[in-house]
Amino acid sequence: MRRVRRRLCNVAAALSLGLCVATAALWVRSYRASDLVHFTTPGRWFYVNACRGTFTAGTWLKAEHNPSSLSPGWQGLPVKSIEWINPNDERKPRRLWRFAGFAYVEPGPGGRLISHRKVYGPLWSFCIGWSILPAVWVWRWRSKAGRLQTGLCPTCGYDLRATPERCPECGTAC
């Protein structure tokens, strides 16, 4: 059972490391190009966007935005062509909550997209989140390797100088 759990943890750490590297690449790319993935359902239009170091996910009604010009899929646009909301604009969105760079946004009064909702956050925070599991894996691997080099049991840390083939404390074969 421990072997299966260890393998699952190794696979999860490798997957998390891959996602961390992919997010870091997307983070760097987001300053050159805006990547937009979008799809539609019968009543709504959904999108995920990475632009200028920010990850955004949102939705709005099809009636408010004409998605006929955009077929579902991926689009890459130069960052210079992306329009940002002017802070002095009376149509600017209303932030319902904001914490550490993350926010949930709805349109304010007089907004042109009445049912537009989005959540956004900085891409660097996703990189940190994805890197936690690989960091724990490396830390545990290093501590286990250090115990083996100093003559300690890799499982419990018991001194194995008297019995180097099996730990008398936990029974692990070394």
Image (tube, rainbow, N blue to C red):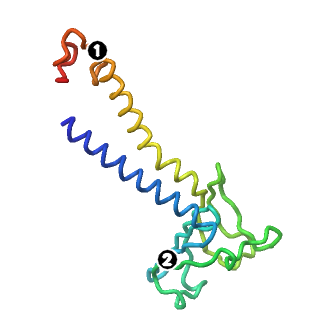
Query: Against 12, is 148 above or below?
Result: above
Neighbourhood count class around disc 2 (C-alpha, 10 Å): few under 14, some 14–19, many 20 upward: some
Is residue 129 or residue 163 the one in the foreground? 163
Q: The N terminus lies in which quarter of the figure?
A: top left
Cβ–Cβ below 8 Å for labels 1 and 2? no
Which residue is tagged 1? 158
Q: In this view, does 79 lie to the left or right of 91?
A: left
Amino acid carrying label 2: it is: His
Q: Where is residue 103 in the image (x, y as percent from the top left)?
A: 63, 57
| Residue drawn at (44%, 83%) of the image | 42
Q: Where is residue 76 in the image (x, y as percent from the top left)?
A: 55, 77
| Residue drawn at (76%, 74%) of the image | 91
| Label whose residue precedes the other's in the sequence (1 or 2) | 2
Q: Which of marks 1 and 2 is in front?
A: 1
Q: Is residue 85 left or right of residue 113?
A: right
| Residue drawn at (36%, 53%) of the image | 15
Is residue 75 or residue 111 the one in the foreground? 75
Where residue 170 is drawn, which disc sits there?
A: none
Location of residue 113 by image quarter: bottom right
Neighbourhood count class around disc 1 (C-alpha, 10 Å): few under 14, some 14–19, many 20 upward: some
Which residue is tagged 2? 38
Helix, strand or loop at label 2? It is: strand
Is residue 111 or residue 21 the one in the foreground? 21
